[in-house]
Every structure is written in structure tokens, then in C-alpha cells.
Image (spheres, rainbow, N blue to C red):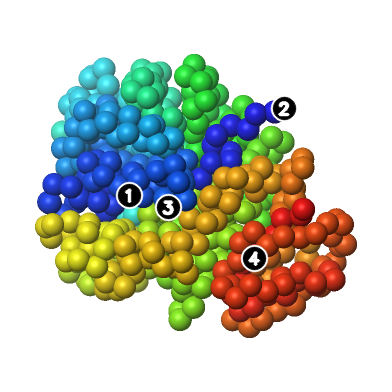
């Protein structure tokens, strides 16, 4: 029997630590807050979500220009979040509940306050000078090339002291490391080892396809786009062939520690890039962000799944995401007046497709984006591009645990405003309501946990054409599950194009409280916004 690695059939839950739970009352979430809520994530029973792992967005010391994605020390915890001792407790308490921990490794760049950069900047002769990407001005005093920063403006910053520019793909407070320097590369690998030694189970790799830039720093070809960054085709500032050797090195390191994993965030990810960078001999997993760009239409999602299934490299594994800390929450994207219904259908899809599902804190209660006024904006690109783009704060608002003041998130003043609807949309209000989004997530995940077909079975779309529904079969030796999803507010009937294998089909889960027959004579019958899962018996 082949064994399935835990990260292929597990459910992974992203925590944005600033916003999850604040134990010390300073308005910012912390590690002790997370520890206090581990039972919500998995207490071993269907009262809890039943997730297999947590991905922690960065908790390292950071001056916070990009809220932790600017790391000043890879081997410590920011006092805002706690201490290494708190971290060890988190790992131990999580492991006791069968929850694994993934660290967010942000190693394309550091903070400008990282000691490595402080040294590198000190003089041209400093041994760490070459750990970052320094260049003389072009002849005539111009910039070394035309590359632009993702967060706006040019990607080169002038350093008066040493008379050179350094490269930063993001903020000027986030200088890019030079992965071509063997000492820098070794130091980064040591940081991975530090956390593996502390017992973490894997890593989420920030902008993993940007580590290398073209050795000759050639200009990118122009293309159409709104922001200056979007007006270049990113041929030379990312996606370089040297990446594969780093992924191999990382795999070898992970293998030293057993069943550890890494999942890559590929910027501007296309299916082709996911296929190029993930699979055997490359990254174990890479996020597929296709769902974050789809309108709420069944054919759009069906095609996104078909594209993913068709493009994966041999031995590659899908990895689906609906929301994260960089994109508007899906309950807001799809929401409108049907938000809770659509949240359930979306969950049923995410958690029954072939692939590793990543959840984002709050989606289990159908949490929507918060409303952030101009003076409340914290996110640097939001400050720069408002009102064209308001930044990422709306998807990072505090987790509403209860209807009390502070939403059970904090005793103090939350670092971002609480969602206006927190008194209605919160964990406590949904816990005992059998029809809540939270109850549906729990049922779904525990059903998934018990089902080999849903966890790692094959995927086959059974109807290619319907405008309003998705119907697919998941099949593992000895088990078949039929998933039927109605994306519309009207009842639908879908005639299956292929005969279903002969079987009696038993209803395992439905969003529809009134039990009814979902399948009759090769026709799937679904109520408005119904998600329905059947098992062949
Ligand atoms: C990734 C992170 C994002 C961060 C950026 C720079 O895209 O997800 O939050 O701002 O990298 O580190």
C-alpha cells in the first residue's frame, strides 16, 4: 500500500498571528492567544474544525514595515508575539492535538534592519556586501536597470554612504538577498534548520520564484498594465532556472528530518509555473491561486480545476486556496446577500477536490472583509495606492470569537477595527447552530477525514456542461463519493453525461436541512445553493 504524505491529504489552516487572538491585551494577536484556541482547530472531536496543520504567517522579530514579511532575525520570535519558550509550547500543545506547524519563511529579502543588511551596507569591503544585490549607477548616474517594485516605484534604492544602489523587489525596507552568494545561501539554509530542530513540520515559502534574478540584470520587456510594476513582463526579475537547485537542496534538508514539507508561494503563478516548480525533485507543493480570480460561476471553477488537473507535472499534487492575507476574503468576493450560502458551497468544493486545501482564519464562520477607513489603513501598498487600491487590511481584521466587546479577540484596542457585523458573525454564535457556516465546515472536514476517496481518490468531472452546478466523482479503492454543488439561488437538475457506476447512493452531507433525494435516475436534483455529498454503498 502506498502511504500518502500528511500534507497531501491534510487540511491546512493559515493563521495571521496579529489578528487571531490577543492574550496580553495589547490589541495585537500573539502566540499565547493561538495556544488558547488550539481546541477550536482540533480537539480530536467533531466539535472542533479538525485541521491537520497551521501555517503561521511570520512571527519573527521585525520592524513591521510589511507586518512581519520584513524579517530582522530568522531565528527568534518578535516580543509582540511572545518568546521562543511560548513558541516551543505552541509546538508541543499543537502536536499533542495532532496539529502540525508550518513556519512562513521570507527569504527572498530581509528587513533593512537585519544585521546582515546593516553589515552589508556598512562598506563596500564588508564580507557581507555581496549578500545583497548592490550595483553602481548606470553611466550618467541613472538606475542600474528599469526594474520596478511590486509595492510601487522603482526597485533600486540609493545608498549615500557607499555610493551604490541596492535592489528591493518590495519596499525599500525589504532589500533582496543575493542567492548567488554561497555564504548567504548557507546562512538561509541554517535558518531552515533552526526551525526544523525546534520541531516544526514544514514551511510556507514566501515569493519562492523570486530568489534569483537574471545574472546580467537585463530589462524586462514592456507590457500593458496599470501600475508601473504591471507594465513589465517579469522575465528577468524572477523565475530563473537556478531556482530548481535550491528546491532540491531544500528537499534534501527536509528529508533529513522525516515527513516535513514545503509549500511555495509563486508570484504571478500560472498553471505552467506551478507545474514547473512543484512535483518530485522540486517543491513538494505550490499554491494554485486560480480560485482567487474566478467569478462565482460553476463553469469558471470547473474549468479552473480542469486546467489544474491537466497541467500538473507527473507526481505533482494540486493545492487550492480561496482566501489568504493578500486577497479579499472569498465571502466578500462572492458574497452579496447569499454570502453564507455561497460560503458553504465554496467550502464543499475546496474540501472535496483532489488536492491539499488551505483555509484562511475566519473563513470557517463565513467572515467577510472588514471596512477600513482611509485614516485606518496600515498596509503600505494601501497607503500608496489609495483610493485606487485600499491595501490588504480588510482581509486581515481580527478574528471574531464572540459578541462581547473586543469580539473575544482582545481586552484592548484592536490593531485593526473589528468587523462591523462581529456581534452576529462570530464563533460563539455559530458553535451551537447546526445550520451555521462553522457547523458545515466541521461536518465537512470530519467527513473528509473519514473518507479515503475525498482525501486522496481520483477526480472525475461527471457533467461538463451545466451552467449552474458542478458534479464530480472521487474514487479510491473501495470507496466512491459523488459531490454535487449548486452555485445558483435556484433549484437545478443536472443530467449526468456518463452513467454512474451501479450502486445505491447514500447521502453523507447536505447543506439542505430538509432531507430529499439528490439523485434520481441519472439526474442530480439540487435545491438553491445546495451542496450535497453522496457515497456509493
Ligand atoms: C508575499 C506575502 C505578502 C508580502 C510579500 C512580501 O507575497 O504573501 O504578504 O507582502 O510576499 O514579502
Mark 2 touching mark 3, by CB under 8 A? no
Q: Which mark is residue 1?
A: 2
**Which mark is first along the chain, 1 or 3?**
1
* Residue 28 in the figure: left or right of residue 359: left
Label 3: which secondary element = loop
**Which mark is first along the chain, 3 or 4?**
3
Examine the rendered structure and indicate whether residue 386 appears above or below residue 200. Answer: below
* Residue 156 in the figure: left or right of residue 467: left
Mark 2 touching mark 4, by CB under 8 A? no
Residue highlighted by disc 3: 47
**Other-residue count near label 1 (Cα within 10 Å), few / some / many at <14 / 14–19 / ≥20:** many
Query: At 77% across and 53% down in the image, what residue appears?
Result: 537
Examine the rendered structure and indicate whether residue 132 appears above or below residue 298. Answer: above
Q: Which mark is residue 16?
A: 1
Residue highlighted by disc 4: 532
Mark 4 touching mark 1, by CB under 8 A? no
Mark 1 touching mark 2, by CB under 8 A? no
Amino acid at each position: 500500500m502506498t502511504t500518502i504524505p500528511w500534507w497531501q491529504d491534510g487540511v491546512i489552516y493559515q493563521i495571521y498571528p496579529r489578528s487571531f487572538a490577543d492574550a496580553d491585551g495589547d490589541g495585537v494577536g500573539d502566540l499565547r492567544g493561538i495556544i488558547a484556541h488550539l481546541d477550536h482547530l482540533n480537539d480530536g472531536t467533531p466539535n472542533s474544525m479538525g485541521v491537520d496543520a497551521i501555517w503561521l504567517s511570520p512571527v519573527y522579530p521585525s520592524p513591521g514595515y510589511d507586518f512581519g514579511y520584513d524579517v530582522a532575525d530568522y531565528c527568534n520570535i518578535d516580543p509582540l508575539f511572545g518568546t521562543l519558550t511560548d513558541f516551543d509550547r505552541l509546538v508541543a500543545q499543537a502536536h499533542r492535538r495532532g496539529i502540525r506547524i508550518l513556519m512562513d519563511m521570507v527569504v527572498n529579502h530581509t528587513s533593512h534592519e537585519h544585521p546582515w543588511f546593516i553589515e552589508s551596507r556598512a562598506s563596500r569591503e564588508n564580507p557581507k556586501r555581496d549578500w545583497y544585490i548592490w550595483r553602481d549607477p548606470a553611466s550618467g548616474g541613472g538606475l542600474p536597470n528599469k526594474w520596478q517594485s511590486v509595492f510601487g516605484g522603482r526597485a533600486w534604492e540609493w545608498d549615500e554612504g557607499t555610493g551604490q544602489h541596492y535592489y528591493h523587489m518590495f519596499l525599500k525596507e525589504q532589500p533582496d538577498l543575493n542567492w548567488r552568494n554561497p555564504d548567504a545561501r548557507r546562512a538561509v539554509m541554517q535558518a531552515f534548520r533552526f526551525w526544523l530542530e525546534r520541531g516544526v513540520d514544514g514551511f510556507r515559502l514566501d515569493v519562492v520564484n523570486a530568489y534569483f534574478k537574471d545574472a546580467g540584470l537585463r530589462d524586462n520587456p514592456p507590457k500593458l498594465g496599470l501600475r508601473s510594476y504591471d507594465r513589465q513582463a517579469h522575465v528577468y526579475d524572477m523565475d530563473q532556472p537556478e531556482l530548481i537547485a535550491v528546491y532540491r537542496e531544500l528537499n534534501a534538508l527536509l528529508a533529513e528530518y522525516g515527513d516535513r514539507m514545503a509549500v511555495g508561494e509563486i508570484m504571478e503563478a500560472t498553471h505552467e509555473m506551478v507545474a514547473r516548480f512543484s512535483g518530485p525533485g522540486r517543491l513538494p507543493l505550490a499554491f494554485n491561486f486560480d480560485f482567487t480570480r474566478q467569478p462565482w460561476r460553476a463553469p469558471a471553477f470547473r474549468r479552473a480545476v480542469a486546467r489544474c488537473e491537466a497541467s500538473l507535472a507527473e507526481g505533482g499534487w494540486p493545492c487550492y486556496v480561496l482566501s489568504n492575507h493578500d486577497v479579499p476574503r472569498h465571502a466578500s468576493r462572492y458574497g452579496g446577500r447569499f454570502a453564507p450560502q455561497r460560503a458553504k458551497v465554496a467550502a464543499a468544493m475546496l474540501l472535496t477536490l483532489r488536492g491539499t486545501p488551505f483555509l484562511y482564519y475566519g473563513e470557517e464562520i463565513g467572515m467577510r472583509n472588514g471596512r477600513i477607513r482611509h485614516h485606518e489603513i496600515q498596509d503600505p501598498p494601501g497607503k500608496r495606492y489609495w483610493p485606487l487600491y485600499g491595501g490588504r487590511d480588510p482581509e486581515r481584521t481580527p478574528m471574531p470569537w464572540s459578541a462581547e466587546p473586543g469580539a473575544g479577540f482582545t481586552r484592548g484596542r484592536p490593531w485593526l477595527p473589528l468587523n462591523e457585523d462581529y456581534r452576529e458573525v462570530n464563533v460563539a454564535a455559530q458553535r451551537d447552530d447546526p445550520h451555521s457556516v462553522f457547523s458545515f465546515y466541521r461536518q465537512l472536514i470530519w467527513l473528509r477525514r473519514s473518507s479515503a476517496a475525498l482525501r486522496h481518490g481520483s477526480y472525475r468531472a461527471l457533467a461538463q456542461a451545466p451552467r449552474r452546478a458542478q458534479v464530480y466523482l472521487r474514487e479510491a479503492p473501495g470507496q466512491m463519493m459523488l459531490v454535487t454543488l449548486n452555485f445558483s439561488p435556484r433549484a437545478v437538475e443536472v443530467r449526468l453525461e456518463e452513467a454512474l457506476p451501479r450502486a445505491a447512493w447514500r447521502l453523507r452531507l447536505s447543506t439542505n436541512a430538509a432531507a430529499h433525494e439528490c439523485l434520481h435516475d441519472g439526474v442530480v436534483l439540487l435545491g438553491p445553493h445546495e451542496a450535497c455529498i453522496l457515497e456509493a454503498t
